[in-house]
Image: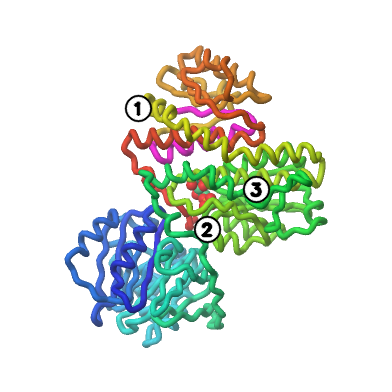
Amino acid sequence: MCGIVGYVGDKTAVPILMEGIKKLEYRGYDSAGIALLERGEMVFQKNAGKIKVLEENLAGKRFTATCGIAHTRWATHGEPNDTNAHPHTDESGRIAVVHNGIIENYRSLKKYLEGKGHTFRTETDTEIIAHLIEDNYDGDLLSAVRKALKRVEGTYGIAVVCKENPDEIIAARHGSPLVIGSGSGENFVASDVSAILRHTKQVVYLEDGELARVTPDGFSISTLQNVEVTPELQEIEWSLEQIEKGGFEHFMLKEIYEQPVALQNAQRGRLDFEDGMSRLAGLQLQLDELLSINRVILTACGTSWHAALIGEYLIEDLSRIPVEVEYASEFRYRSPIIPDGTVVFVISQSGETADTLAALREAKRKGATVLGICNVVGSTIARETNGGIYIHAGPEIGVASTKAFTSQIMVLSLVTLLLGRMRHMSIEKGRQLLEGIRNIPTQVQLILDNAEQVKRIADMYCDHNNFLYLGRGINFPVALEGALKLKEISYIHAEGYPAAEMKHGPIALIDENMPVVVIALKDQVYDKVLSNIQEIKARNGRVIAVASQGDDEIKRLADHVIYIPNVLYHLSPMLSIIPLQLLAYYIALNRGRDVDQPRNLAKSVTVE
Ligand code: F6R
């Protein structure tokens, strides 16, 4: 999704802005641009394609500007070409705007402005903002931006500069994240802290409806209604090393390999062996509130939604509380019934997904207690929920989510343990789960140590154009997630199914060209899954099985067996997904795909 970086200070702006937008590349984009206040003039460069193109076009030009804004665009209105790339300007070319989000009433605003003599050069909704600001500008940029935004409907995170206000950036937010970075003699604006982490760890997150006036010496924040806001500085915990590749070829591979540490961090300080339960103070719920929960709704998008499905198996089986899982994009537009005693968990790696945020707000409006399971500390979802649990996976930069997924399941296991122990679960069962949870990071490491085998299988199957993924019980969502990983980064068609559903349709697809990845662990549904494998083999399908260590029987049936350590059924998804992440990665690599920035995808989906 689009990225914003702004700089105003005493250094040359170009390198800081370029480095900043490069840090946002992972979010997905199709064009990039920059606007500088250069010796009393506004200078632009913007290009379709990668940041490299922009860099080539800037090369050799000696800029001295100490104030500017830069942008990576993920097209929504108008194709990704040079003209539609941001920044966009007003009629006179004095004012430049970069924008994340969507202006919903841009057509009526355009008509209004055209009526006043404005002409437009692009197909974008963003250009309207620049013209609206111009329409209200009388030397005071902050006031002009405020007046313009009062007419705007939709979502935005914007940064604005004006030729006549050379040491000033105005930033504003409504529904699209924006952070102000505080430095000494310099200040920053960014849509994601990773863009400015090299320069400062002191930041202020703008809230919806807030504007910031940022100068080299400081910044002030006010609302659309012109009420002053006292900025609350926060310290970013992530380090620079964490957002770099650290010797791995791709962020995705690095993040797959970080899972043992991430899973350790997700459980650190939260295991209570004495009482056989978990400690989750972040939920901020009193004992009676925890006891009165009689229904759970889990809502999320994409991979986080798959984690929610696993949460449903966990909580219903072990805590004996009815659970509903719903796509956040559906939840927000339904009229969900939320009786007393319902707790809604929103699950989001980024904490900024527009649909999930909207579902959160809808649930709150209906009076539910809404809790978050997030990775990014200080993200909008983390701030707007009544309480929650951070997964502490560290920055996830590869577009395909890996370590956040397993860490979300880890946290859902801890929630299950807490809710279960307050109801039917015995202390012995609680301790058994805790023991299993404690072993997960080491077991994940053992699977990673066997990555070469998965790579060999990937080499053999990378030319196939269709894959089926099957699993049962708690491993059915893992099949969905395995298929999603493959399609996202290799562009191969893949479908996940509950194994027994195969005979109700997908079995028609099976022949020697259809590899079927089957999760067949030694659990309560093992025999059933073996029968499904037999059905596939009878039709000449190729089976890649993920099986439990020591299971020799499956070798006779499957074409390839990837073993994982023995694990409690309810914790098994944290292990069974690892070979599937590796398989997707190596197949995509074989096909020469851009693993970290797959086409059309964005890391943080901040538009609807
Ligand atoms: C898939 C993936 C997406 C995200 C989805 C939700 O690999 O990353 O499906 O899971 O966009 O994002 P978050 O968890 O940030 O709300």
Q: Can residue 354 be seen here? A: no
Residue 592 location in percent, x, y?
A: 31, 37
For disc 2, the marked residue is 352
Residue span colored magenta: 467-491
Is 313 situated above or below 163? above
Measure the C-alpha gap from mark 2 to mark 1: 36 Å
Residue 600 location in percent, x, y?
A: 38, 47
Q: Can residue 412 be seen here? A: yes
Q: Secondary structure at mark 3?
A: strand
Residue 161 location in percent, x, y?
A: 35, 76
Could you classify mark 1 by the number of other residues whose Cα lies within 10 Å: few (under 14), some (14-19), or many (20 or more)?
A: few
For disc 1, the marked residue is 463
Viewer-proximal residue among 235 and 465: 235
Mark 1 and mark 3 in contact? Answer it, CB < 8 Å: no
Report if the beta carbon of the residue with label 2 is closer than 8 angstroms to ligand 1: yes
Residue occupying the point 80% across, 47% down: 422
- Residue 485 forms part of the magenta stretch: yes
Disc marking residue 298: 3
